[in-house]
Image (spheres, rainbow, N blue to C red):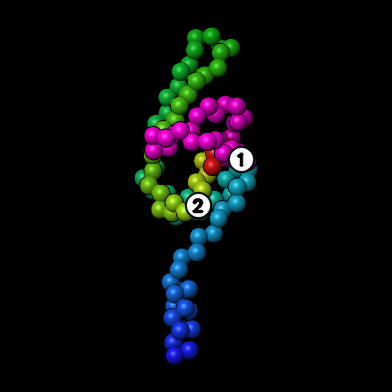
Amino acid sequence: MHKSIILFFLVLLMSCQFSEKVEVVDGVSKELADHRKAHISDLAYDLTFDIPKEQVEDIKATISISFELEDVNEDLQLDFKEDRDHLLKVIANQQILDIDFRSEHII
């Protein structure tokens, strides 16, 4: 009986998928790129720019990103290599989210 319980737990452990968290660092590491390739599909971007006549004014822009995400158990890192104050709002699934901005990424 004792051996069968140990065997059951070994099989259970072997069948579990371990999802290692990708460290949030500046830029896009090979680990992050590989993780994205494995877990994100059907990626599409919709960009909108409001370019003013006067070159001294800011260019306002919005981006809509749609995709299929395989693993929702860990944070998604979106690249944003700009100052935090350029990011006004993040909306996901029609809900405004608190902005978590770290190391050139929106989390």
Q: Residue furthest top?
A: 54
Q: Does the magenta stretch include residue 34?
A: no
Quadrant of the image containing the N terminus: bottom left
Give the label on residue 12, or none: none
Asked if disc 1 and disc 2 are in contact, CB closer than 8 Å, the reply is no
Residue found at x 39% / y 38%: 93
Where residue 73 sits: x, y (%)?
47, 54
- Give the residues drawn in magenta, as a range: 80-105
Q: Label 2's element? A: loop
Q: Mark 2 points at which residue?
A: 74
Query: Percent x, y for residue 31?
Result: 56, 54
Classify 10 Å Cα crowding around label 1: few (below 14), some (14-19), many (20 and above): some
The stretch drawn in magenta includes residue 97: yes
Badge number at residue 102: 1
User: Residue 106's quadrant in the figure?
Assistant: top right
Q: Which of marks 1 and 2 is nearer the N terminus?
A: 2
Residue at point 60% right, 51% down?
Answer: 23
Q: Give the residue displayed 42% in from the left and 28% down from the top.
A: 47
Q: Image check: 68 left or right of 35?
A: left
